[in-house]
Amino acid sequence: MKSLLVPTLSVAVMAVFAQPAAADTILNVVTAGDVNMVDYVKDYLGPMFEKTHPGVRVVSVGTGPGDAGSQTIYEKLSAQKAAGSTAWDFDVLVIHQKMAGQMVREGFLVKYRDTVATGKLFSRDSAKNSLGTNVEGFVLPMFHSQTAIAYNPDMVKDVPNTYSELAAWVKKHPKQFGWNGIKGGMSGVAFAVGWVSAFAGKQDQLVAGPYDKAIETAWDGPLASLKDFNTNVVITPGNAGTLDQLNRGEIAMGPVWVDMFYSWMADGKLPPNLKLKLIDPGMPGQPMYYAVPVGSAQKQLAEEFVALATSPDVQAKGIVERFNWYPGIDADNLKGKVADAAWAKLFGDIPPATLAKNGQSFPITPYFNDILEAYEKKVAN
Amino acid sequence: MSRSSAFALLLVAPALALVAVFFLHPLVLSVMSAFMANGQGPTLANFSRAFELYSGDIIFTIFVVTSATILTLVVAIAIAGALTLSASASFIAALRFLYRWPLFVPFIVAAQCMRTFLARNGLMNNAFVALGLFDPTTTSGYLDWRGMVITFAWKQVPFVTLLIAGAMASLDRATIEAGRDLGASRLRVLVELVIPQVMPTLLVSATLSFVLMLSVLSVPMMVAGTQPTLITVDMAFRINAYGDYGTANALGVISYLLASGAAIFYLRHTLKDDRR
């Protein structure tokens, strides 16, 4: 009995210890995003990466949506940096624009664009400039999301092409346009910012700086006209509220996120005849960024992971077809890789040329905050 | 100090410590932060910004929460009165069964239901149209202050009814029956005999409802647009959009003042009862 027990036990012990020894370099990918984005890494990108990298396990962690999620990542890394840790807990970061700028300024990120093969596939300004900070080389856009005006063609015959035409349309059709103000989600924030930059001008200075408070006097007129505009619109409860009211036919038009619009339509929560229009001179959108922290113990693997994630195939199947996001890499790299139906859907209402012309960035942080507060002061109260 | 009172103090010490650490400490911090700006203080800068940007919302908050409290009381008195004065046992049983349901529904769920129920082409209006009561072109949505008042009242009525009906049940039935014998209608008995006797309970439950509704974030976020909105939404926005805890805390202090107005009311009545 005894003679049998010892070898059995030692085999069992060996089996237990052999498991982690043989396998598993762990690559930690942290995402400041909603569950769907965390699942995108966990269920889609992770397994794909593990297949080409035997012995590597991808662990996907989420810190929650919005800038607050990026803030959490920053706090964790900054604590590890302050403690002098040599192997930080995260290897690949998925972060928002505001925090990407701050992390670059504070020296948290690896300059890796030139070492990955896909680094050449980005020509949009968003790969270089993040709300006024030069981030060139440190980040690669995972995807772009974009706001646009959604409308119901049964109710809107003379579709407005510009903000001025929209204002005139709303006068003629009171309570047919709905938006969510600035406290009910980013689609409303994007509309307010787009309005101010359309009527006050200086769009370039708003998105690239330098910050000069003097130009803000030009906002008074646009904000007064926005207040007047608001008397004829419906203020909806949130991003989802605008889509809900479009769905029920209570409003005929409203600003929405393009990816939400298509996802809701695919789920049957919006009538399939609704359309999008990216009016002149444009509306803001924002990318999410892939970045590699300087304290990662797996920089090589991390860069390979980002290279896979920004490869045309993954951008086509994952980003465009699965999530209806606009690709992070330039769209012309995806021709022939995206199913025709998905391509027609994403670029049918807003062709790539319009997107390039009218897809704006959000303003640099100080202007961004000033626009919101000016709106609160002059329009909302 | 006697040994038994030392022992009693020891027993309540954990509870006191919890209150101190998780309530008093953050309360003091938040009040202090309301009077600080850029690490400097004391200053009223946060309050002047709060009034400059949110004076409309502060008044709106008082209006919505007061209206909701009044509606809650009216409906709760009607239900509790019916439970107390109705002669039909089966009606009472059915009402008693039904009115408590919203107690078990969280605010956020109630708000999500009301979003589709009260919309212009929502369930309620569609039902009215189907019944031929409304013309579809003349319906209007309730996703504004009315939606908030209705949602708050829907959620708070069972709680207030529970308290008031309990108080009514413990009244001396003789006064009610005397009134009925002398020919008073049920409504008159309710208004002139029953309500005056349960007034303390009524005021206390109104106070508790007022304070609770003042603190809700989900309902104004989900049921109505944000112009105007309740100050809870403004507080969340100050923090999420600007990282500005100072102004958020100034709004918090304004909210404490509104609540403590109600709390003074509450204390006066409970203390009076205790003295009796």
Image (cartoon, rainbow, N blue to C red):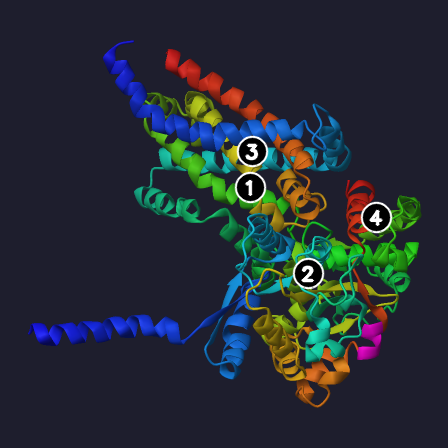
| Chain for numbered disc 2 | A
- Residue designated by label 4: A227
Same subunit: marks 2 and 1 = no
The residue wearing badge 2 is: A242
- Asked if one can make out residue A179 in the rendered structure from this viewpoint, the answer is no
Q: Earlier in the sequence, mark 3 or mark 1?
A: 3
Amino acid type indicated by mark 4: Lys
Neighbourhood count class around disc 2 (C-alpha, 10 Å): few under 14, some 14–19, many 20 upward: many
Cα distance, mark 2 to mark 1?
Answer: 22 Å
Q: Amino acid at mark 3?
A: Ile
Callout 1 amino acid: Val
The reply to whether discs 4 and 1 touch (Cβ–Cβ < 8 Å) is no
Q: Position of residue B254 (x, y in %)?
A: 64, 29
Q: Which mark is residue B216?
A: 1
Asked if residue B34 lies left or right of residue B26, the reply is: right
Residue B169 in the figure: left or right of residue A100: left
- Bounds of the magenta span? A351-356
Are the numbered discs 3 and 1 placed on the same chain, yes or no?
A: yes
Question: For mark 4, does the 10 Å Cα neighbourhood hold few (<14), some (14 to 19), or many (20 or more) residues?
Answer: some
Name the residue at the bottom extreme. A336
Q: Which mark is residue B70?
A: 3
Marks 2/1 in contact by CB < 8 Å: the verdict is no
Question: Circle 2 sits in a helix, a strand or a loop, which is it?
Answer: helix
SS assignment at label 4: helix
* Cα–Cα span, label 2 and label 4: 19 Å
Chain hosting mark 1: B
In the rendered structure, which amino acid carries the disc numbered 2? Thr
Q: Is residue A135 magenta?
A: no
Report how far apart the C-alphas of labels 2 and 3 lie in the structure. 31 Å
- Alpha-carbon span between mark 4 and mark 3: 32 Å
Please name the predominant secondary structure of the magenta segment in the image.
helix
| Residue contact at pointers 2 and 3, CB within 8 angstroms | no
